[in-house]
Image: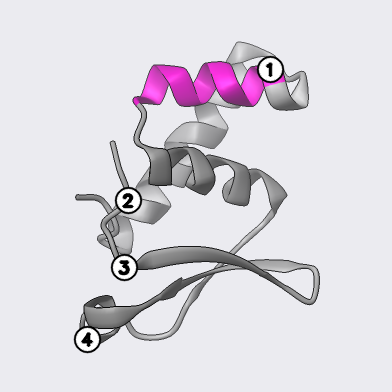
Amino acid sequence: MKIKEGFILRNVAGSYVVVPIGEATLDFNGMMSLNETGAFLFGKLIEGTDKEQLIEDLMSEYAVDKELAAKDVEDFIQKVEREDLFE
């Protein structure tokens, strides 16, 4: 899975937001707010990765168990899919 080109992650006054740039601004209105975990996952998806690797990375970064990491990753993937941000 990989985020489409034209979307960047920014930290604005302590809040994480995804904003479109360039041609992506034509198809995406506004921005998407993320918490710290969402920003971490979004950064991994910009690089391109699969669901299992996201779970492993989340477990390693935040010392959570696999069940919680899998739920968080699934919820986040659904959010990104709703916004149509995957290539």
| Sequence-first disc among 4 and 1 | 4
Nearer the observer, disc 3 or disc 1?
A: 3
Disc 2 and disc 1: Cα gap in Å? 22 Å
The amino acid on which the numbered mark 4 sits, given as a three-letter code, is Leu
Mark toward the start of the polypeptide (2 vs 1): 2
**Residue 86 magenta:** no
Q: Is residue 62 above or below residue 30?
A: above
Distance Cα–Cα, label 3 vs label 4? 10 Å
Mark 4 Cα-neighbour bin, 10 Å: few <14, some 14–19, many ≥20: few
Question: How did the renderer colour the structure?
Answer: one colour
Mark linked to residue 26: 4
Nearest to N terminus: mark 3 or mark 4: 3
Disc number lying in front (3 or 4): 3
* Alpha carbons under labels 3 and 1: distance apart: 28 Å
Q: Report the Cα–Cα distance between label 4 and label 1.
A: 37 Å
Q: Which mark is residue 3?
A: 2
Picture quadrant where residue 4 is located: bottom left
